[in-house]
């Protein structure tokens, strides 16, 4: 595969400046093996499971580089448990969730998942962080939230450390904590997201960041957009939605089943919606009865993170477990429009790189 050189790609020792986020071990490994850098998201893995996940990626990639993404949102309660929170949920909210179960005839969940068995707390995050400090992972990125102490501890262990941001305010609060790179993630992105579009955000953050490398994220699913991101001053891209429909995502933990994949194939760039209904923070997903119900005027206002999870965790687990058609959904961004067939990660990487190079050469025609 042709190489696309940027300073940051050279620092990471990767052939193409494509970093790929996934909750799948196999997808993460495949992205690294195809010349980019796989980023495994541990948000749903309790601390004791993290070393096993890292070892599983390492087993597939040898000593090639890969990354971990960790979320450390501020304001999570230390003294509560999932049970104590569930015992005190507001009655109107519980009634609303019961009405959804009734309306969509959702069978009871029997699986235990992150959604119905974990409450996000500072000690959960500290346990995950400790697992990263003890690991041989090359790069760590903070999804939502970080502390200067966590950044310093990771850097002392020789990790390359970065963070995702969605607006210039985040940059102002992160600029002095010693990060090695920034991911500027525009609103088009899948999962938690802000309101500024990628085309607006990226050059703004590039300018603010000065010498600090910036990766562009949000809505990127075609190689021409990679060329555009590089033209805007980014040193690479960070993609999440693109991998959901790949062959490697069809098995293992967080496998995407045939029914959900068919929905992803049928989702156009205009068919996603932002809801607070899943986590309490704004999250872009494919539009479904789930997003519609939480947007209805009669719906209660979603609770803040982590309380919304405690409210809907069983229902989310049941929707996935029983593939409840109308409510079945996934976080996904507007670039889902480029996912129309089940392909291997290597094929996707090949096409992205080829189209990025074509875009770069097209752009070069305009200067003499
Ligand atoms: C299914 C899914 C789950 C995600 N989970 C996380 C997460 O746990 N932590 C995080 O920092 N970002 C998460 N993201 C966001 C990605 O890291 C990335 O910023 C985003 O997908 C880029 O935009 P795109 O979806 O348009 O490619 C997730 C994205 C998707 C599609």
Image (cartoon, rainbow, N blue to C red):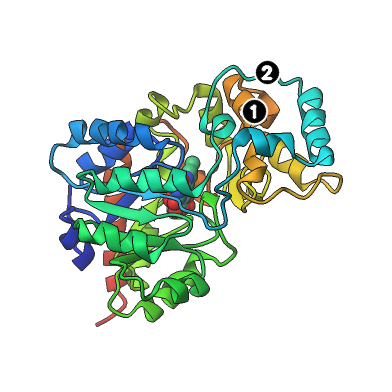
Residue 329 versus residue 253: which sits nearer the camera?
Answer: 253
Residue depicted at 24% across the width and 82% down the height? 368
Q: Which residue lies furthest to the right in this view?
A: 298
Alpha-carbon distance for marks 2 and 1? 8 Å
Pointer 1 local density, CA inside 10 Å: few below 14, some 14–19, many at least 20:
many
Residue 323 versus residue 96: which sits nearer the camera?
Answer: 96
On the rendered structure, is 35 left or right of 162? Answer: left
Q: Where 35 falls versus 260 (above or below)? A: below
Q: In the rendering, which numbered label is found on residue 314?
A: 1
Residue 127 in the image, given as x and y percentages of width and height? 38, 43
Q: Quadrant of residue 101?
A: top right
Q: Do the residues labelled 2 and 1 touch (CB within 8 Å)?
A: yes
Residue 121 in the image, given as x and y percentages of width and height? 52, 46
Can I make out residue 114 in this image? yes
Residue depicted at 81% across the width and 46% down the height? 300
Identify the element where label 1 is drawn.
Answer: helix
Which of the marked residues, 2 or 1, is nearer the chain's N terminus?
2
Identify the element where label 2 is drawn.
Answer: loop
Q: Mark 2 points at which residue?
A: 108
């Amino acid at each position: 595969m042709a190489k696309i050189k940027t300073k940051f790609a050279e620092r990471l020792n990767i052939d193409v400046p494509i970093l790929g986020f996934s909750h799948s071990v196999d997808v993460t490994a495949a992205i690294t093996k195809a010349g980019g850098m796989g980023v495994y998201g541990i948000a749903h893995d309790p601390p004791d499971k993290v070393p096993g996940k890292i070892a599983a990626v390492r087993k597939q990639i040898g000593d090639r580089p890969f990354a971990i993404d960790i979320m450390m949102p501020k304001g999570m309660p230390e003294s509560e448990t999932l049970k104590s929170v569930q015992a005190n949920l507001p009655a109107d909210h519980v009634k609303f969730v019961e009405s959804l179960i009734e309306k969509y005839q959702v069978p009871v969940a029997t699986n235990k998942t992150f959604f119905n068995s974990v409450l996000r707390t500072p000690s959960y995050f500290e346990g995950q962080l400790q697992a990263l400090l003890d690991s041989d992972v090359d790069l760590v990125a903070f999804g939502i939230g970080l502390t200067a102490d966590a950044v310093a501890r990771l850097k002392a262990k020789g990790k390359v450390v970065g963070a995702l941001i969605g607006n210039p305010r985040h940059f102002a609060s992160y600029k002095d904590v010693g990060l090695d790179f920034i991911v500027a993630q525009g609103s088009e992105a899948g999962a938690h997201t802000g309101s500024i579009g990628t085309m607006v955000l990226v050059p703004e953050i590039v300018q603010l960041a000065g010498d600090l490398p910036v990766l562009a994220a949000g809505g990127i699913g075609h190689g021409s957009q990679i060329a555009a991101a590089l033209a805007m001053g980014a040193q690479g891209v960070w993609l999440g939605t693109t991998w959901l429909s790949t062959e490697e995502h069809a098995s293992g933990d967080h496998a995407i089943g045939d029914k959900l994949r068919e929905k992803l194939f049928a989702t156009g760039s205009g068919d996603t919606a932002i809801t607070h209904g899943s986590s309490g923070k704004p999250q872009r997903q494919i539009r479904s009865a789930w997003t519609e119900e939480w947007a209805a005027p009669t719906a209660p206002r979603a609770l803040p993170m982590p309380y919304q999870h405690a409210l809907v965790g069983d229902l989310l687990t049941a929707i996935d477990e029983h593939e409840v058609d109308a409510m079945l959904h996934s976080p996904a961004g507007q670039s889902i429009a480029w996912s129309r067939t089940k392909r291997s990660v290597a094929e996707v990487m090949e096409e992205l790189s080829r189209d990025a190079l074509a875009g770069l050469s097209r752009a070069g025609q305009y200067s003499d």
